[in-house]
Image: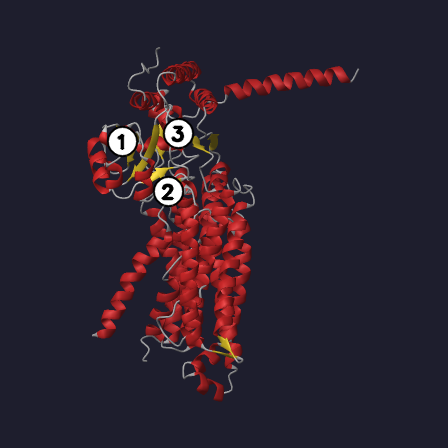
Amino acid sequence: MKRLLAPRTLFLSLGLLWLLAIWLSLALGPVSLPFVDTLRAGLRLLGAPIAGQGLEQAELIVGQIRLPRTLLGLLVGAVLALSGVAMQGLFRNPLADPGLVGVASGAALGAALAIVLGSGFGGLPEALAPYLLSLCAFLGGLGVTALVYRLGRHNGRTSVATMLLAGIALTALAGAGVGLFTYLADDATLRTLTFWNLGSLNGASYQRLWPLLLVVCVVALWLPRRAQALNALLLGESEARHLGVEVETLKRELVFCTALGVGAAVAAAGLIGFIGLVVPHLLRMLVGPDHRLLLPASLLAGGTLLLFADLVARLLLAPAELPIGIVTAFIGAPFFLFLLIKGRG
Amino acid sequence: MMRRPSVLIALCASLVFAAVAQAEPLPQRWVSAGGALSEWIAALGGEARLVGVDTTSQHPESLKALPSIGYQRQLSAEGILSLRPDVLVGTEEMGPPPVLAQVRQAGVRVELFSSKAELTAVDENLKHLGTLLGAEQRASTLASDYRQRIQALQAAIGQAKTHQQAPGVLLLVGHGGGKPMIAGQGTAGDWLVQQAGGRNLAEHDGYKNVSVESLAGLDPEVLVVSDRALTGDAAVQAMLKENPGLSASRAARDGRIVVVDPTLLVGGLGPRLPEVLQSLARAFYPQGNVSFKP
């Protein structure tokens, strides 16, 4: 595969786009703030000694609403894209998506369980409800992925093909479980469930960023260490083994990182599709298949793309808001089709 | 001796605070996230103060021209703040909680109301709204009027029940014909049927699809149809055409089919309810003189 861009150009432009996305995400929203106010509020948040008179509104909007939301978008986008790279590397297939190992459907099942049973017990305590939902989603994703991995193992070897099939079967099973909970749910619960399935960065707060930050750090630091091994895996499993890669360990790490990363992202923002599929795909076209470039580039591009999608989500119907999963699918699916058609001709 | 002056100071302080509390200006810019609440606000003459409503606020018709803040459970903090409201009113269904916290933090009053289907909830909600709108008098008139009408209707239904058994009723929520959902126990639809003196034949909980066979087996005497896409006769015809099991029922044979507005079934008791209850009760007890005034 030829590369279209030199690495230096790529990272420079990705970095600039990343910063632009952050700035726009802080500067734009249904409340229109003067440019100068956003800048001053931003600088004050960074600790710059600027007089805060007349800035209360801007500081609140930028500091308490837009900044946590922007950070959430950066983290979720980054970890989804990284997991996409890991899965496409593991399955040696550019169409692989973090959903293949069952993490998204498991998380959806966990969330449905929390939402429906929570309301069945007369509603959870207000303070606890969001955490329980996130925890159930996270554990559901982790549990189903662990099961998929376990089913793929035989005689100390992990068969990727078996994992793929087990992933499909368990996804269907989890889907049936979600369907059952949907049937049991009352009207109000149904709406909550539907919206959760479409994802949103709405209502982000600093307290809820910490667990995600921790997970993203682990994934973002771990995966690049295995970039060379992922490159070797591209040649095939036995080739990688001959090159001295501990293939079984690598597979376990890839599955674990994906489950952890996507599980945490879904727990924080609901199901957001297409980022994990499109971002690595696009970047591979731009810089080639070398994972040493692909991983850090995906980290930047994933966050950037999700922030742009979120801008659409919050501005298009303002003062109401569109679930972000709709936006990413509307951008992602046609783009994917475009790639397909272009690749064919 | 130290006691007295401190008590006096406390008294003065509380008087001052009370005065301050009273002097707090009434909220002028309102955002409402609840269908029934928006209707009550309009009924209390506060429609001009509304600057935004949620998607469940469909009545009166003029509310649809206002900016929409989305669905009541999926509000956006910045979206609401962009309308520069003084107060956000909604029911306990309003959310998500982090967004409400952000709205409060921005200095917007968030006032919560009950969406329970109870007359006491109507009393309390009206009193609360009346205070916020500065229309206490009108609110208490509306509340007592509402209570009286419902109670008179209940009395008339009780009277009618001595001559006629409570009819078996099914309430169907459909969408352009299609497969209708049946209002089961504990739903707003169930409440509506019961209050109008009907006996809900559905035994399941919540709104569920029920097989055509078991519908035919229930053989309802009256059908209440609430369609989200069609209104009036069109809704009835579409529903009967799609569900042959129902067209053979006593209700269809005797033409005892009533249509109600689906927006009535969302978000607590609204001002249009007594009229609807009366029309339902008249359909349930055609012989009885069922009205607000016995």
Q: Which residue is mark 1?
A: B250
Q: Which residue is mark 3?
A: B30
Task: Where is residue B176? Give x, y as percent.
Answer: 24, 40
To which chain does the residue with label 1 belong?
B
Seen from the viewer's position, the closer of residues A95 and A62 is: A95
The residue tagged 2 is B208
User: In the displayed structure, would residue B64 be above or below residue A264?
Assistant: above
Q: Is residue B147 above or below residue B54?
A: above
The quarter of the picture where the C terminus of chain A appears is: bottom left
Whether residue A199 appears in this view of the structure is no
Image quadrant where residue A76 sits: bottom left
Q: Which residue occupies the extreme top position in the image?
A: B294
**Which chain is mark 2 on?**
B
Instruction: Name the element at disc 2.
Output: strand
Residue B101 rendering spot, x and y as whole percentages: 50, 40
Q: Nearer the viewer, mark 1 or mark 2?
A: 1
In contact (CB < 8 Å): disc 3 and disc 2: no
Q: Closer to us: mark 3 or mark 2?
A: 2
Kindly identify which chain the residue marked by label 3 belongs to: B
Give the amino acid at mark 1.
Arg
Q: CA distance from mark 3 to mark 2?
A: 36 Å
Dots 3 and 1 on the same chain? yes
